[in-house]
Image (cartoon, grey):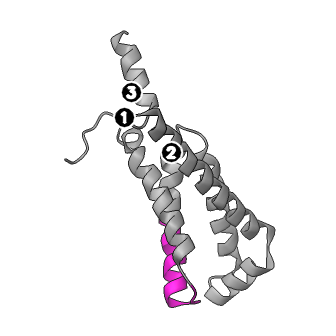
Amino acid sequence: MSHSASITAAHTLPIRGSRLALIALWSVQIVVAGMFLLAGGSKLAGAAAMVALFDAVGAGQWFRYVTGSIEVVSAIALLVPSFAPFGALALVATMVGPIVTHLFIVGGSPAMPAILLLGSAAVVWTRRNQVLGNRQTVR
């Protein structure tokens, strides 16, 4: 294998290790993407529960559209290998809001937003070399 072929192979595979690890990563990405497509789609479609939630938060319905758009676009990005870490990073930042909202404003369990945040964070961490390129990570 030539030097350039080894660089290309190392760059396209975000994780070192077994095929099973790669399958696990893609499984997480697909599940997280599906959840965000459903959640973002319901926000954009104006589902009654989402309209009521954003009314209770008090941020306005425009924020429902912004959040839904971020979720849908980022979910699609999770399914494209070169965009996956960036989509996951946007979702990590987006999920901080629902956790805080559930804890301090509307009540209820923040478990689902926390699980989605952890899944997105796992994708970011696993694909961190795609974001950092050839730069060394902190050891």
User: In which quadrant will I find the N terminus?
Assistant: top left
* Residue drawn where x is 66% and y is 89% of the image: 56
Residue 31: x and y, percent? 61, 54
Considering the numbered disc 2 on the image, is that residue within a helix, a strand or a loop? helix
* Residue 26 circle label: none
Quarter of the image where one finds residue 5: top left
Separation of residues labelled 2 and 3 (CA atoms): 18 Å
* Residue drawn where x is 40% and y is 46% of the image: 126
Relative to the observer, which residue lies in front, 58 or 108? 108
Which residue in the structure is indicated by mark 2? 24
Q: First in sequence, mark 1 or 3: give its number.
A: 3
**Residue 96 belongs to the span the image colors magenta:** yes
| Comparing labels 1 and 3, the label whose residue is closer to the camera | 1
| Comparing labels 2 and 3, the label whose residue is closer to the camera | 2
Residue 33 sits above or below residue 17 on the image: below
* Residue 10 circle label: 3
Which residue in the structure is indicated by mark 1? 16
**Residue 104 belongs to the span the image colors magenta:** yes
Residue 103 sits above or below residue 9 on the image: below
Residue 85: x and y, percent? 48, 47
Quarter of the image where one finds residue 83: top right
Relative to the observer, which residue lies in front, 35 or 58? 35
State left or right for residue 64 relative to residue 103: right
Q: Which residues are magenta?
A: 93-108
Q: Label 1 sits on what residue type?
A: Arg
Q: Label 2 sits on what residue type?
A: Ala
